[in-house]
Image (cartoon, rainbow, N blue to C red):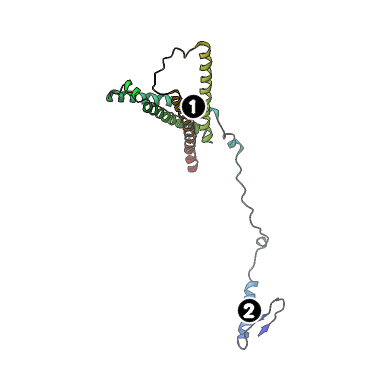
């Protein structure tokens, strides 16, 4: 049996016979239940909340971000001090080991390649540790942007080294300061020495740069852990 109700847009098929009355009663009960539900007026006009806007950063806090020369400078001082201490400690340890093993200068000259590589590797490693320490100190001092502070430590060292090298070259051309220096004789060709020096210099620049940046980021993590607890 099909039945069309006023206001409906669809034809509803209802059961025939005795079930028609029960169907009508159920439909009327459902209509009364729906009509008794009251929806507040403010909820009818409620719109979805807008997307969360980005948290505004305090301008005073932004002033503390970025590269800080003071933090980088003191980090560089720490790096220089650590370089001196570490190289002095390694030199003393190497001297004591050579005395115990009876390793003389003649033995080093007999294997110039191995001796040069060992000395260069140990020196680069010690300087890398020193620059990590300097970057860490700079990151702790500046609190923000630890990687930039570590890069600043490395850049100050490079600039100071370039200035010192240029000044030494100028004084040498004027007064011949290095002409009277006694250079140890090494049984290696000039090309080998040149290539080895270039490779050691490149490794030194890259490793100290990475160590300073990583140290700066590690120094900043100290403040990040404190901020999480506050």
Name the spot of residue 108 as percent of width and height, x first. 34, 23
- Disc 1 packing (10 Å; few <14; some 14–19; many ≥20): many
Observer-nearest of 199 and 33? 199
* Residue with the most extreme top position: 175
For label 2, the SS is: helix
Q: Tell me which residue sits at (39%, 28%) in the image.
A: 117
Name the spot of residue 92 as percent of width and height, x first. 34, 23
Is any atom of residue 71 visible in this view? no
Mark seen at residue 34: none
Quadrant assignment for the N terminus: bottom right
Is any atom of residue 83 visible in this view? yes
Q: How many marks?
A: 2
* Residue with the most extreme right position: 6
- Distance from disc 1 to disc 2, alpha carbons, whole Å, reads 85 Å
Please tell me whether residue 67 is drawn above or below residue 174 in the rendered image: below
For label 1, the SS is: helix
Q: Tell me which residue sits at (37%, 26%) in the image.
A: 115
Observer-nearest of 95 and 144? 95
Q: Tell me which residue sits at (45%, 32%) in the image.
A: 132
- Determine whether label 1 and label 2 are within 8 Å by CB: no
Between marks 1 and 2 in the image, the one whose residue lies nearer the viewer: 1
Name the spot of residue 137 as percent of width and height, x first. 47, 31
Q: Which callout, 1 or 2, points at the residue further toward the start of the chain?
A: 2
Q: Tell me which residue sits at (51%, 23%) in the image.
A: 161
Mark seen at residue 76: 1
- Disc 2 packing (10 Å; few <14; some 14–19; many ≥20): few
* Residue with the most extreme bottom position: 17
Name the spot of residue 179 as percent of width and height, x first. 46, 13
List the residue tagged with mark 2: 27
């Amino acid at each position: 049996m099909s039945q069309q109700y006023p206001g409906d847009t669809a034809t509803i098929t209802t059961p025939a016979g005795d079930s028609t009355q029960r169907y009508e009663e159920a439909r009327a009960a459902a209509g009364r239940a729906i009509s008794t539900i009251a929806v507040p007026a403010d909820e009818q006009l409620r719109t979805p909340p807008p997307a969360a806007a980005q948290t505004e950063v305090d301008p005073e806090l932004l002033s503390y971000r970025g590269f800080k020369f003071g933090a980088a400078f003191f980090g560089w001082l720490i790096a220089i001090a650590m370089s001196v201490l570490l190289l002095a400690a390694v030199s003393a340890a190497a001297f004591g080991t050579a005395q115990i093993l009876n390793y003389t200068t003649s033995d080093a000259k007999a294997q110039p390649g191995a001796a040069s590589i060992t000395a260069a590797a140990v020196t680069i490693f010690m300087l890398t540790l020193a620059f990590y320490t300097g970057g860490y100190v700079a990151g702790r001092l500046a609190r923000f942007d630890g990687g930039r502070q570590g890069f600043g430590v490395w850049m100050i060292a490079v600039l100071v080294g370039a200035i010192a090298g240029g000044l030494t070259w100028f004084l040498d051309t004027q007064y011949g300061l290095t002409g009277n220096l006694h250079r140890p004789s090494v049984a290696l060709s000039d090309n080998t020495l040149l290539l080895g020096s270039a490779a050691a210099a490149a490794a030194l620049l890259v490793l100290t740069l990475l160590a300073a940046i990583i140290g700066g980021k590690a120094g900043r993590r100290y403040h990040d852990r404190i901020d999480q607890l506050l």
